[in-house]
Amino acid sequence: MVASSVASVVVVGGGIAGVSTVTELRKNGYAGGLTLLTADPFPYDRPPLSKAYLSGAKDLESIALQAPEWYAGQRIDVIRGLAAALDPAAGTVTLSDGRQLSADRIVLATGGWPLWPDIERVVRGLLDRPPAGSGIPRSTTGIHLLRSAEDADGLRAVLLPGARLLVVGAGLIGAEVTSTARKLGCEVVLVDPANPPIAAAVGAQVAEWLHSLHALHGAETVTATVEKVESTNAGVVAQIAGEASPRTFDAVLLAVGMVPDTAMAKEAGLDVDNGVVVDDHQVTSHPTVLAVGDCARRQGHRRAEHWEAAVHDGARAAATILGVDAPAASAPWFWTDRYDLHVEVVGEMHEPEGEHEQVVRGTLGEPPFTVFTLRGERVVGAVAVDDPKAVRAARRMIDRGVDVRAADLADPSTDLRQLLRSAR
């Protein structure tokens, strides 16, 4: 058992970052008091919200991050409530109902809010962004956000066969919801000003192919902005830039990104700059407060919004509280699913300019295939479609910094594991 001078910890937020923090603490021998505060009925996984949960294939219990008895068995007090105020000096978190939690260390895992696009006449009442778990619906006017199960429930209720859905934003969430809605028989128009969307994340070649899948599956894609959205008795009326007349939809999903939930941290006097600023140990500008997941940004790094990044944040925070070394860092990785295809991305997908080169293993557009990005003879990124073994190998190549030949990567008959072993 690891000895720790920290007698009690409160984790504010029941997403993957918060649950990862408490899991890593107990797994590594933390014996002190441990409280997890969540605004939701219980901590659940968010990636299925735009896919299996939204389609109805999974219910809320099936996407729980841990079974209820697990928390009891680990002596973790799970408290449902909304954090309203933080006092770092006193070591307290005050809930919206007046209850107060005290601890030697407080870990902020407050996540983020859907980003509101700059669209004229979006219903003003939604701009207050009532929090998940507050019981205040965020989708009563046909204009939807998607961050919580509550949001997904509201959106799912309108995704009936033949329903007309406008999706604003073709990033991961927008694309996944478009795929799910098409499977449910909805008519979908997907609007994004970027052409192709998410090129910075997966490279232009793959991005263009992924975006083309929407049309192949019957969704209409429009490269434009949305100038106006207005809820009327006939439906939600949207004016798409460049079009002569507005269109009417049964529902609109705004999926243009997220902003970190830093309001409480800022009010408490912590340094905030596109996230609660933390050091390499997840410690904020106050030594007794740590921050993890979507709400946090490590100084000198871009803020990461992916599931695995939140898991790593939780592991680092736990190590800091325990006074032990943090797990070794690995290349960033994330995944997305659409139209029954599984896409994984690792590292950085630099465009092939200067010293960067992109190599296709297989045939682009005919899954399974993988596109690697190399700098010289080093793999720096890869995106794989229905090819998880290739992306796992690419991750090891990046982490170990091994030299490989582009011709070997491009040859589907080359065993990538053998390539790794021979490169040692």
Image (cartoon, rainbow, N blue to C red):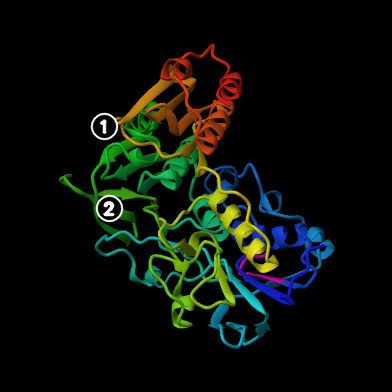
Locate residue 267, reporting x and y percent.
45, 82
What residue appears at the point 66 percent right and 68 percent down from the top-left corner? 321
What residue appears at the point 49 percent right and 38 percent down from the top-left corner? 346
What residue appears at the point 55 percent right and 82 percent down from the top-left corner? 86
Q: Amino acid at mark 1?
A: Gly
| Magenta highlight on residue 122 | no
The answer to the question of whether label 2 and label 1 lie on touching residues, with beta carbons closer than 8 A, is no
Locate residue 15, reporting x and y percent.
60, 60
Q: Secondary structure at mark 2?
A: strand
What residue appears at the point 56 percent right and 48 percent down from the top-left corner? 329
Looking at the image, can residue 337 be seen? no
Quadrant of the frame with the C terminus = top right
Q: CA distance from mark 2 to mark 1?
A: 42 Å
Per the image, the residue denoted by label 2 is: 238
Above or below residue 32? Residue 251 is above
Instruction: Bin the neighbour count of mark 2 within 10 Å (Cα to Cα): few under 14, some 14-19, many 20 and up.
Output: many
Locate residue 271, reporting x and y percent.
43, 75
Q: Amino acid at mark 2?
A: Ala
Number of disc labels: 2
Identity of the residue furthest to the front in this view: 424
Per the image, the residue denoted by label 1 is: 354
Above or below residue 260? Residue 60 is above
Instruction: Bin the neighbour count of mark 1 within 10 Å (Cα to Cα): few under 14, some 14-19, many 20 and up.
Output: few
Locate residue 419, reporting x and y percent.
56, 20
Is 42 on the left-hand or right-hand side of 193? right
Going from N to C along the chain, the mark reached first, 2 or 1, is 2
The residues colored magenta run 35-41
